[in-house]
Image (cartoon, rainbow, N blue to C red):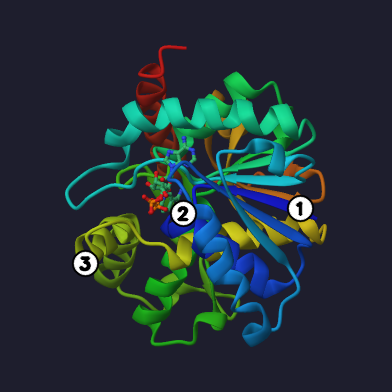
Amino acid sequence: MKVTVVGAGAVGASCAEYIAMKNFASEVVLVDIKEGFAEGKAMDLMQTASLNGFDTKITGTTGDYSKTAGSDVAVITSGIPRKPGMTREELIGINAGIVKEVTANLVKYSPNVIIIVVSNPMDTMAYLVHKTSGLPKERIIGMGGALDSARFKYRLAEALEAPISDVDGMVIAAHSDTGMLPLLSKATRNGVPVTEFLSEEQQNFVIEETKVGGATLTKLLGTSAWYAPGAAVSTIVHAIACDQKKMIPCSLLLEGEYGQSDICLGVPAIIGAKGVEKIVTVPLTEAEQAKFNEAADAVRAVNGDLKL
Ligand code: NAI
């Protein structure tokens, strides 16, 4: 499996590192626009190979997309991250131009590629890739729910004082501070609903901390996070590479699922060798469906700024 990661910054490099560490890809190509940056990151990562015991070959290029030819999967992390106090939506002006150009270059050299969109505002960037790439919908995956669900499980485990592996939960809808929908009604600890263990106050705390999970880190770090985003992307790439048919919430083009159409939003899906193998419909409560619809309205308004 050949994987291209565009953007060798914080998230792109972290993602390349996790992919290499899992040792399932033969090749990872890092692409960046900053002269020598991707080459440097690739060399640094390659010098960890003998220490960390992986055989994945990592190379870097400053914008030469011919080096990405024949990629099975490409991850788009190029663009600017948010600074403290910014929303993801404020990044659209710069990132839309970058994502559009990068997508065209990727598809030119890898017509069969599966694209994973990471750049923010992610749901809108995934929609942009659908509108401009010409790729079938099962080959475009927005990464948000995998990360947000990991943050949800972290907060649940903390509130329950339980090991993370005992906890299961999922976040759907939009990858934004207001549009995220942590499905508390379906979260479990060893199969038992978490609502049986947590007070209402604790439940609200978990939901609110999950929704502002990215903003909390941005405040602490001065820029957005990279370890968990990189790991979340690598989980999706792994599911594709090894045809795991694993259920992962991803931002996907909806055509009637969850009552929405012509929009990318986070929903659970089976991810395997073909990319999106199936969107899974989990029954939502009336209140959850209302929140899902509200998130869709907000994303649709941001999509309008693309002026497609
Ligand atoms: P960063 O600034 O560390 O890295 C971005 C890289 O993209 C830079 O090295 C830059 O030179 C490169 N770049 C810019 N224009 C390019 C172009 N036209 N072609 C190739 N490379 C180009 O930023 P970071 O922290 O890695 O974040 C990247 C993006 O991912 C941001 O938009 C951020 O908001 C988003 N993000 C999304 C998450 C998600 O869950 N979907 C989670 C975390 C970050």
Per the image, label 1 sits on a secondary structure element best described as strand
- Asked whether mark 1 and ligand 1 are closer than 8 Å, the reply comes as no
Looking at the image, is mark 1 or mark 2 earlier in the sequence? 1
Residue 216 quadrant:
bottom left
Image quadrant in which the N terminus is located:
bottom right
Check residue 264 in the rendering and tell me which mark sits there, or answer none: none
Single out the mark in the foreground, 2 or 3.
2
Residue flagged by tag 1: what amino acid is it?
Lys
Looking at the image, is mark 3 or mark 1 earlier in the sequence? 1
Q: Which residue is mark 1?
A: 2
**Label 2 – label 3 distance at C-alpha:** 25 Å
Vertical position of residue 244 compared to residue 260: above or below: below
Q: Which residue is mark 3?
A: 220
Left or right, 264 with reference to 298: right
Q: Position of residue 15 (x, y in %)?
A: 55, 61
Residue flagged by tag 2: what amino acid is it?
Phe
Q: Position of residue 181 (x, y in %)?
A: 42, 49
Q: Position of residue 165 (x, y in %)?
A: 56, 81
Q: Position of residue 36 (x, y in %)?
A: 48, 52
**In the image, farthest residue toward the front:** 36
Residue 226 quadrant:
bottom left
Q: Which residue is mark 2?
A: 37
